[in-house]
C-alpha cells in the first residue's frame, strides 16, 4: 500500500508561482510513474504533468512551458513547479502514482488533493 501526501497548495495572484509537493510512502524509483492531475468544479479530471520511470516527462497542453515536474528519489517526493499561473489553473490538484503490483495490472494510488486558487 502506497500513501501519497500532497502539500503546497494555496491562494496566489495571477502571474504568480506555487510549488506543490507529493511525498510517497514507498520508493518512487520503482514506480512506473508519478504525476499530477487536477479537477476544477464542473470539469473532468485532467492530466497536468507526470514523470515516468527513467525521467521522461509529459505535460498537459494547457501547462506546457509554465509548469515543471521533477522528482527527488532520495526523498521519495515529486514536485510540481507552477509559474505564470492563470485563473483557469485553479483546481484541486491530485498526486497520482502507478506502481508495479507483481500481478498482471499495476496498482494506482491517489493523494487526497490540494486546492490551488488563482485570483485575477
Image (cartoon, rainbow, N blue to C red):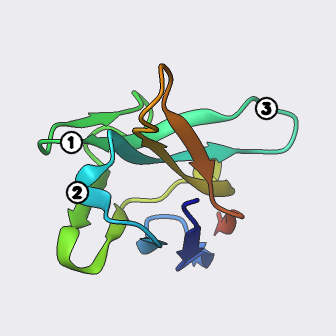
| Along the viewing direction, whichever of 17 and 25 lies nearer the viewer | 25
- In the image, farthest residue toward the left: 54
Q: Mark 1 to mark 2: distance in Å?
A: 7 Å
Name the mark nearer the viewer: 3 or 2.
2
Name the residue beneath numbered marker 2: 29
57 on left or right of 12: left
Answer yes or no: do the residues labelled 1 and 2 have beta carbons within 8 Å? yes
109 on left or right of 67: right
How far from the left and from the top, in percent, is residue 115? Answer: 70, 67
From this view, report whether residue 56 is shown above or below residue 82: above
Categorize mark 3 by other alpha carbons within 10 Å: few (<14), some (14-19), many (20+). Answer: few
Look at 21% across and 42% down and name the residue there. 53
Answer yes or no: do the residues labelled 3 and 2 have beta carbons within 8 Å? no
Name the residue beneath numbered marker 3: 43
How far from the left and from the top, in percent, is residue 50? Answer: 36, 42
Categorize mark 1 by other alpha carbons within 10 Å: few (<14), some (14-19), many (20+). Answer: some
Say which quadrant the N terminus sits in.
bottom right
Look at 33% across and 48% down and name the residue there. 31
Q: Mark 3 to mark 2: distance in Å?
A: 32 Å
Look at 54% across and 38% down and name the residue there. 107
How far from the left and from the top, in percent, is residue 46? Answer: 60, 32
For the residue labelled by badge 2, is the local secondary structure a helix, a strand or a loop? helix
For the residue labelled by badge 3, is the local secondary structure a helix, a strand or a loop? loop
For the residue labelled by badge 1, is the local secondary structure a helix, a strand or a loop? loop
Categorize mark 2 by other alpha carbons within 10 Å: few (<14), some (14-19), many (20+). Answer: some
First of labels 3, 1 by sequence position:
3
Name the residue beneath numbered marker 1: 53
Amino acid at each position: 500500500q502506497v500513501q501519497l501526501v500532497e502539500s503546497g497548495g494555496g491562494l496566489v495572484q495571477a502571474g504568480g508561482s506555487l510549488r506543490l509537493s507529493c511525498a510517497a510512502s514507498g520508493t518512487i524509483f520503482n514506480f512506473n510513474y508519478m504525476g499530477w492531475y487536477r479537477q476544477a468544479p464542473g470539469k473532468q479530471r485532467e492530466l497536468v504533468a507526470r514523470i515516468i520511470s527513467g525521467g521522461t516527462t509529459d505535460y498537459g497542453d494547457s501547462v506546457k512551458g509554465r509548469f515543471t515536474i521533477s522528482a527527488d528519489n532520495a526523498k521519495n517526493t515529486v514536485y510540481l513547479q507552477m509559474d505564470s499561473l492563470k485563473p483557469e489553473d485553479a483546481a484541486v490538484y491530485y498526486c497520482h502514482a502507478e506502481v508495479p503490483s507483481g500481478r498482471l495490472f499495476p496498482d494506482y494510488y491517489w493523494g487526497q488533493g490540494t486546492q490551488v486558487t488563482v485570483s485575477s
